[in-house]
Image (cartoon, rainbow, N blue to C red):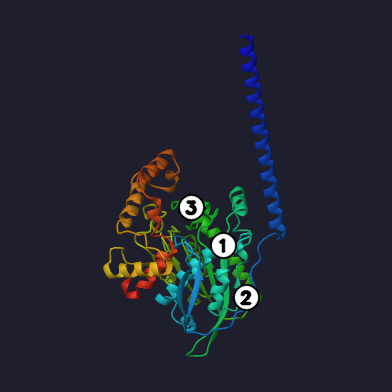
Amino acid sequence: MFRRREERRGRGRRALLALLVIVALADSATLAGAAVLHARRLERVSGTNAVTAPELVVERREGPFVAQVDYAALFSADGHQVSSEVSWDDDWFFQDSTTYNHDLAHTCAVLSAVANAESAYYQQGSSSPAYAEHAFAELGFEEVSTASYRYRSEVLDEVLGILDGTDVVAYTLATKHVRSSQTGEEKLLTVVVVRGSYGSEWLSNAKIEDATDEGGEGDHLGFTLAAEEIVADLEERASQEPGVERTYLFCGHSRGAAVATLLASYVDDGGAIASAESVRAYGFATPNCTSAADARDARYDNIFNVLNPSDVVTMLPPAQWGYQRYGTDVWLPKTDDGALTEGMRASYRASMGADCPVAPEDQATAEALVSGVTAHVSSLDELFSPAGLAALAQACIGVDAGQLLASHYPNTYIAWLDATSAEDLTFS
């Protein structure tokens, strides 16, 4: 009996010792992690230990011309180089900004995919090319800046973003002097392509002002904070060269699209960087980003949201809660649209080296998911209540998230734009 008691005491001591070791290791890991994060904060403040932007020699090209743009893409076949042919014409920027331009939309969709791919270049040890710089060099741009990707593409920086609660945005800014072939008039074109949701930026997507909040301006808070950073950059650049005639093009996919449309709405509302007729925006998979009652007014007609009817992201936050988009919605065909769908699938396979995963039933699935939530939840505040989260969980039962999001990804949009013309689209 005594011997068994001593054995139990020995096992108890060993278990206690093991627990103390685990606690000590956990504390050490926590302290080590905190030290690493603090060191990274200091590096960000001092501007050290980050991947620097590449230096490229670019040659001016005047439109019209066709260029080949390479980039990385989700769901492409292993080892497959994704490449898209895009059109360019300087004359586009001397035409009516409120008229939809399908060729420009296609080019913007590809550039938006490139903006997402650029993140890999800014990760330590990566061998990924600087896709954005190469793309704009192909288009003859004189300056390409992706400085905002520094400290916003590493895993460690994303962890800091979550802990610090910061709203950040990464974007490519490129400039080019464009000249009208008809009049010889010249302008300085600035293109801003905003990266889609990346890392901790997903948390920013949830920073939505309630549409019933009379104290707010009606715009999505997270997207607005991102847009404000870019506006400050553009205003600073404009102040350094006063008197220059400027024109702007804003574009992006998903979160990038929402920020791009808010940039254009800022100018349309009287923002100082340019006149409204000198600005155009093309967003792809644009979520609802405002509760402003006048978001469809004519002054926002230079904003175009290219949308896939089966893309659930375009249905969020729900219209039933009072949210919508600035500008004009441009709807792609439905996935069961015969020859157009076949053309889309052929384009997808040619560029991605894999079959397009979207299916005709995806639209019904997306709509059922949203209606399943809004039938029981009437506002954003209710969504984050226990009952709201239960309704969300119930609506998600049986939903294949990967299949649902296939309609959302950039190359699905690019394939649709390859296979269609403006006459195949629906405007609302």
Residue 278 image point, x, y percent: 50, 77
Question: Eyeballing the image, is 35 above or below 422?
Answer: above
Does the image show residue 265?
Answer: no
Which residue corresponds to mark 2?
56
Question: Eyeballing the image, is 3 above or below 361?
Answer: above
Which residue is at 63% across, 72% downward? 237
Q: Residues within 10 Å of mark 3 (few under 14, many from 20)?
A: many
Which residue is at 48% across, 66% downward? 113
Does the image show residue 398?
Answer: yes
| Residue 209: mark in rendering | 3
Farthest residue in the left direction?
338
Kindly check if marks 2 and 1 are in contact, taking CB atoms under 8 A apart as contact.
no
Residue 377 image point, x, y percent: 38, 45
Farthest residue in the front direction?
3
Q: CA distance from mark 2 to mark 3?
A: 42 Å
Which residue corresponds to mark 1?
119
Which quadrant holds residue 392?
top left
> Closer to the camera, 114 or 313?
114
Q: Residues within 10 Å of mark 1 (few under 14, many from 20)?
A: many
Q: Does residue 383 appear left or right of residue 49 in this picture?
A: left
